[in-house]
Image: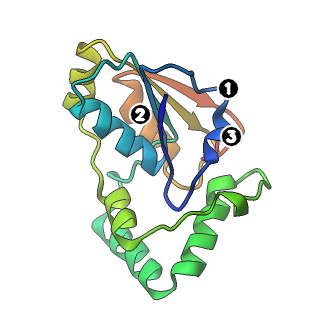
């Protein structure tokens, strides 16, 4: 399985053992990594049977001013922004992500916030025979889970997990 990490994270795939499938033909990603996993699968010429998107980062329902504000806060104090971001990632759990911190960059955050999920591209990937599964937490504080669910559930299988947040805990 090829796995793509969330923004400012590494090794967090250990939290998703219930959702992940060990297979050479499976691609998975969490949050920002879900965007990267999708693009990898979409642009790949190799065999891919399953794409697992864990809490895909979904901000296309936000106004441009929201994105500009997030980027400005990050640029002003990267450490404080990342600390608050990771608190929101683990909510409502009390897990620590200290052992999973990686270097997040302004460019990665800009890419994450500006990414647009394209319905036709997802449908094309499905038409190629790739099973696309999405897992979302009802209590997600990173994205508007309701808007994400509304978008993705019209296209593919979405597992809505009650009582958990972005980290699916």
The local crowd at label 1, few if under 14, some if 14 to 19, many if 20 or more residues have their Cα within 10 Å, is few
Q: CA distance from mark 3 to mark 1?
A: 8 Å
Q: Is label 1 in contact with label 2 (beta carbons under 8 Å)? A: no
Image position of 66 with respect to 28: above or below? below
Which residue lies at the image location 36% right of the left edge and 60% below the top edge?
A: 113
- Name the quadrant containing residue 142: bottom right
Q: From this view, report whether residue 115 is shown above or below residue 69.
A: above
Label 2: element kind: helix
Residue at label 1?
18
Left or right? Give the position of 14 relative to 37: right
Observer-nearest residue: 168 or 24?
Answer: 24
Specify the color scheme: rainbow
SS state under label 1: loop
Mark 3 and mark 2: span between their CA atoms? 25 Å
Image point 29% across, 39% down: which residue?
39
- The image position of residue 96, as x and y in percent, is 76, 58
| Up/down of 86 relative to 59, above or below | below
* Residue 46: quarter of image: top left
Mark linked to residue 150: 2
Q: Residue at x 77, y 50 (%)?
A: 93
Q: Earlier in the sequence, mark 3 or mark 2?
A: 3
Badge 3 is on which residue? 15
């Amino acid at each position: 399985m090829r796995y793509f990490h969330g923004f400012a994270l590494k090794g967090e795939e250990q939290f998703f053992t219930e959702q992940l499938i060990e297979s050479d033909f499976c691609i998975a990603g969490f949050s920002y990594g879900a965007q990267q996993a999708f693009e990898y699968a979409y642009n790949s010429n190799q065999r891919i049977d399953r794409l697992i998107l864990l809490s895909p980062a979904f901000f296309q329902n936000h106004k441009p001013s929201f994105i500009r504000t997030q980027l400005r806060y990050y640029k002003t104090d990267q450490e404080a922004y990342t600390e608050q971001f990771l608190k929101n990632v683990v909510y409502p759990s009390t897990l620590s992500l200290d052992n999973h911190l990686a270097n997040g960059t302004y460019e990665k955050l800009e890419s994450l916030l500006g990414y647009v999920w394209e319905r036709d591209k997802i449908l094309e990937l499905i038409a190629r025979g790739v099973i696309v599964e999405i897992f979302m937490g009802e209590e997600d504080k990173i994205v508007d889970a309701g808007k994400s669910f509304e978008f993705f559930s019209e296209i593919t299988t979405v597992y809505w997990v009650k009582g958990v947040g972005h980290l699916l805990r």
